[in-house]
Amino acid sequence: MGYGDRLFWLSVLIQRRYAQICAEHDLTPTQATLLCAIKDEPRRMTDLAASLGMTKNALSQLVDRTERRDLVSRTTSEQDRRAITLGVTATGKVLAEAIYAETDRLLPDIAEGLGPEDRREFERTVTAVVDASGVSASSSS
């Protein structure tokens, strides 16, 4: 199995675990990702679409479904009526925090078969990859 194959299977492991966590909260992984992306501060829809790798149309449909559950709310900028900002509702914030905490607690279990030093190295490598990609919450605002 090549390096690309291993990365593919790592992705499958991560997605499967994340989907299990989301299902426990009656959310799709995409809905949970949306909530986690805006849990700390509202974001413009255009910025969200870009950072989540979605088309504006796909994001709008996701927001419609999530808004019907009273988890997110849209506001229009007074300076530019075309600019829409998305934020979490109080209910959405609680759910986002729960998903975030569960993910932080349970997702690292994918490395449970590694020894302590390999786990630390895995964590260092994952951190470096995410930091270099620019997709982490702290660098996407």
Image (cartoon, rainbow, N blue to C red):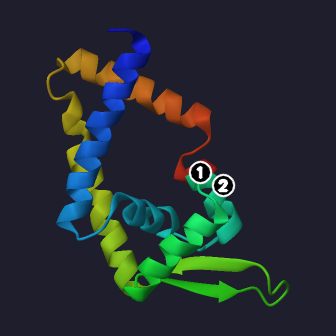
Q: Residue 20 placed where, x, y %?
A: 20, 54
Closer to the camera in the image, 135 or 101: 135
Image check: 65 left or right of 80?
A: left
Residue 139 seen in the current view: yes
The vertical placement of 123 against 17, above or below, is above
Q: Quadrant of residue 126?
A: top left
Task: Residue under label 1, please give it.
Answer: 53
Instruction: Please tell me which residue is depicted at 17% across the width and 64% down the height of the picture.
Output: 24
Q: Secondary structure at mark 1?
A: loop
Q: Residue 28 placed where, x, y %?
A: 32, 63
The vertical placement of 76 against 50, above or below, is below
Q: Quadrant of residue 122?
A: top left
Image check: 25 left or right of 32?
A: left
Residue 141 seen in the current view: no
Amino acid found under the numbered disc labelled 1: Gly
Closer to the camera in the image, 58 or 35: 58
The vertical placement of 14 against 103, above or below, is above
Q: Looking at the image, do the residues carrying marks 2 and 1 touch, with CB atoms under 8 Å apart?
A: yes
Res. 50 mark: 2
